[in-house]
Image (tube, grey):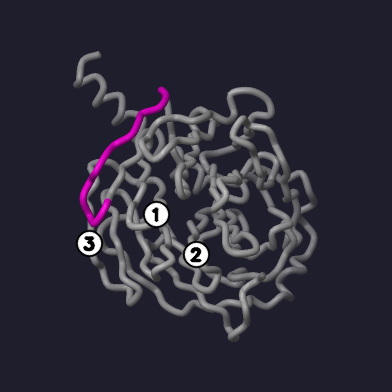
Amino acid sequence: MNRKLITYASLLIIVVFIGYIVYDSIKPSAPATEKTTSSYEERDIEDAWKIDAVIHVNQDKLTSVAASPDGSFYAAGNSFVSCYSDTSKIRWTYKSENPVTAIAVHSDTVYAATVNQILVINDGKLLNEWGPYENNSIITSVSAGSDRIALCDAGNRRVYIIDKGGEVLSIVGQKEPQFVLPSAYFDVAISTDNTFWVANTGYRRIERRSNDGNVEGYFGEAGLAPEAFCGCCNPAHFTLIPGGFITAEKGINRIKILDDQGKFVEYVSSHNDFTPSVPLDIASADGQTIYAANPADSKIYIFKRKQETESIK
């Protein structure tokens, strides 16, 4: 295929993706199947966390965040990937030719997703580019483990498990049970034992899947209750922490912690002024500090518990 045609096709995919996200963020949410006229009982539950710091990201519009066990964290957006020290100072910035839609870090290597590729970055330098893996891809999430990586392709409603050389090990979602995605929110997290969890947002749940695609367990349901996910497309984002999960929703913009069985533990943020239709991407390496990237104002909110309490075990 002519190189110019490939370039034009890639640009068209990016424009369609960005346009879809903008449309999805401003259109009214589809009616939920549960009653939405009941009072917010969860508003009687006090947020257990507070905003400890706010980082203004000036490089370009912010899209995503990742955290490292050494205390550093990473921000990505329309044209950049930046590494911040544990004192929130920028260590390095990589300039991307295409918008970065998601980011993950393992050891000192960063895996940044564009609409149809994965960029492998170390110390601000591009080491490799993987993909595209399929036509019409819209990569919305990437998660890195010790020897493999999981990425979500909302365009084709599939999860790719790839090795650290970028080669595909398995593709999940080609056959039943497939993923139901009302919009381009499709998140994945891979654990230290290479188990991977994926948000099947049409069912308002997080599933544990095997590499051959079988559903081995799940939690979540539609509803307004603290442990449930209200409206469509939720949870929009989630991440693994020791002993459980942190989830972020759109519609009712709340961030909460669930245990490893999906039971509600506490709210990180439910009384806030965040734009309801724009969920915050979230990251945490230890469950003690939570980073939330807000695309609506291009700020990273750093949350700490209001009281010194142990993380869930």
At x 54%, y 48%, the residue is 190
140 relative to 76, above or below: above
Spatial separation of the CA atoms under disc 3 and disc 2 = 20 Å
Q: Is residue 129 magenta?
A: yes
Give the label on residue 105, or none: 1
Q: Mark 2 points at which residue?
A: 284
Q: Quadrant of the C terminus?
A: bottom right
Spatial separation of the CA atoms under disc 1 and disc 2 = 11 Å
Residue 135, given in percent of the width and then of the height, sits at 41, 23
80 and 27: which one is in front? Answer: 80
Q: Does the magenta stretch include residue 143?
A: no
Residue 239, given in percent of the width and then of the height, sits at 55, 56
Q: Name the residue under label 3.
A: 92
Image check: 138 left or right of 229? left
131 and 101: which one is in front? Answer: 131
Residue 227, given in percent of the width and then of the height, sits at 73, 60
Q: Which of marks 3 and 2 is nearer the N terminus?
A: 3
Which residue type does callout 2 highlight?
Ser
Image check: 101 left or right of 50? left
At x 39%, y 45%, the residue is 101
Q: Is residue 16 visible?
A: yes
Rate crowding at label 1 as few (under 14), some (14 to 19) or many (20 or more) other CA atoms within 10 Å. many
Residue contact between numbered discs 3 and 2, judged by CB atoms under 8 Å: no
Residue 194, given in percent of the width and then of the height, sits at 55, 46
Q: Quadrant of the N terminus?
A: top left
At x 58%, y 77%, the residue is 49
Spatial separation of the CA atoms under disc 3 and disc 1 = 14 Å
- Which of the 4 image quadrants contains residue 265? bottom right
82 relative to 113, above or below: below
Give the extent of the magenta segment: 122-135
Which residue type does callout 1 highlight?
Val
Q: Is residue 15 visible?
A: no
